[in-house]
Image (spheres, rainbow, N blue to C red):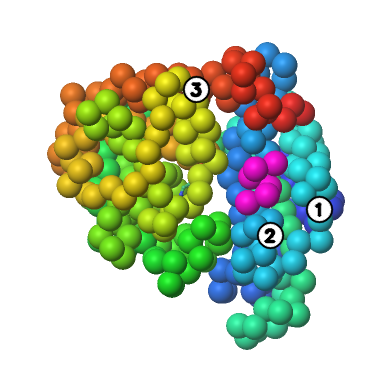
Amino acid sequence: MATQKVWMDGKLVDYDKANIHIMTHCLHYGGGVFEGIRLYETEKGRAIFRLREHMQRFLDSAKIISLKIPYSLDEICEATREAVRANKGVKVDYIRPIAYYGTGTYGLNPIKLPTSIAIAVVYMGVYLGEEQMQKGAKLITSSWEKPSNRALPVNAKVCGHYVNSVLARLEAVNKGADEALMLNSEGNVAEGTGENIFMVRKGKLYTTPISAGILEGITRDSVMVIADDLGMPVTERDITRGELYIADEVFMTGSAAEVQPIYSIDGLVIGQGKPGPMTLKLQKAFCEAARGKDPKYWHWLDFV
Ligand SMILES: Cc1ncc(COP(=O)(O)O)c(C=O)c1O
């Protein structure tokens, strides 16, 4: 059974009727913000992973583009739970909240426009594929540059920003790869199209800093906390493309992608050509935390 109900501006509507007007400002100009949140099956029922952190980022992204959200953090979290509850018994594992400038003007200035908000609960599955999760995904370096903080507030999850990600992902798929690696305007590694990136070199873990022009990933943060707890702290520093080629292990993190091992970059096989020991350790610990198997991280789960 597919998604039954979508939460739209305070009401639960049938999935097929969750539509918008063709003149919606966001559809033309990209002025909206969204989130991607995982929903896990646990022994104690369904759990939303780090709901408050995701919804805080949602409100922060909205603030950055001056989009007024007529709900408090508590209210929007409760709306998310309501959307999940309305899809009881449905095979779903991913929540997509979106807030956007609605209808009322055809020009660019959105200041007088109403905000519309929707929360859909859908099935995502394994983001880059089951085989890629087992053996590692193939990356290419995108010829598209990640927009700099001078061009866009890249720490905000704004709909329009994702044209850059879509182009890079298309390029990767057209070249036979699974995913694209984005370099920033300095030529250093930024992140994936919808994931942050980590590498292991000489037994140490590294990830790119916020100043590299990345989204401050919640999975990135979770993995950093878990790595620290496992006695393998992560250093945030600039990473070059060449360094990734000779890393012992590379993996990506994201709500959709979870902890995704990387097999090759630009045709060069990473490390031993299979998910490395630190990647596997973190992947296992993250999976257990997200699925409620480790009481240490129960505070990350919002049971519905
Ligand atoms: C560009 C980008 N980077 C990184 C991430 C990973 O962030 P998170 O772990 O919060 O899903 C995402 C996904 O939301 C993303 O779109």
**What residue sits right under mark 1 in the picture?**
72
N-term-proximal mark, 2 vs 1 = 1
Residue 141 pos. (x, y %): 25, 52
Relative to the observer, which residue lies in front, 31 or 92?
Answer: 31
Frontmost residue, 221 versus 170: 221
3 or 2: tag closer to the N-terminus: 2
Image quarter of the C terminus: top right
Report the residue at 44% width, 48% height from top: 194
Q: What is the C-alpha distance between the residues marked 3 and 2?
A: 35 Å
Dot 2 amino acid type: Ala
Q: Position of residue 284 (x, y in %)?
A: 45, 19
Q: Mark 3 sits on what residue?
A: 229
- Mark 2 and mark 1: Cα distance apart in space: 14 Å
Q: Magenta segment: does it hold 287?
A: no
Mark 1 or 3 closer to N-term? 1
- Marks 1 and 3 sit apart, C-alpha to C-alpha, by 32 Å
Q: Residues within 10 Å of mark 1 (few under 14, many from 20)?
A: few
Amino acid of disc 1? Ser
- Is the residue under label 3 in contact with that under label 1 (CB below 8 Å)? no
**Residue drawn 44% across and 26% down?**
227
Task: Find numbered disc 3 in the image and state the secondary structure of the residue it sits on.
Answer: helix
Residue type, label 3: Asp
Q: Is residue 54 magenta?
A: yes
* Whether residue 140 can be seen here: yes
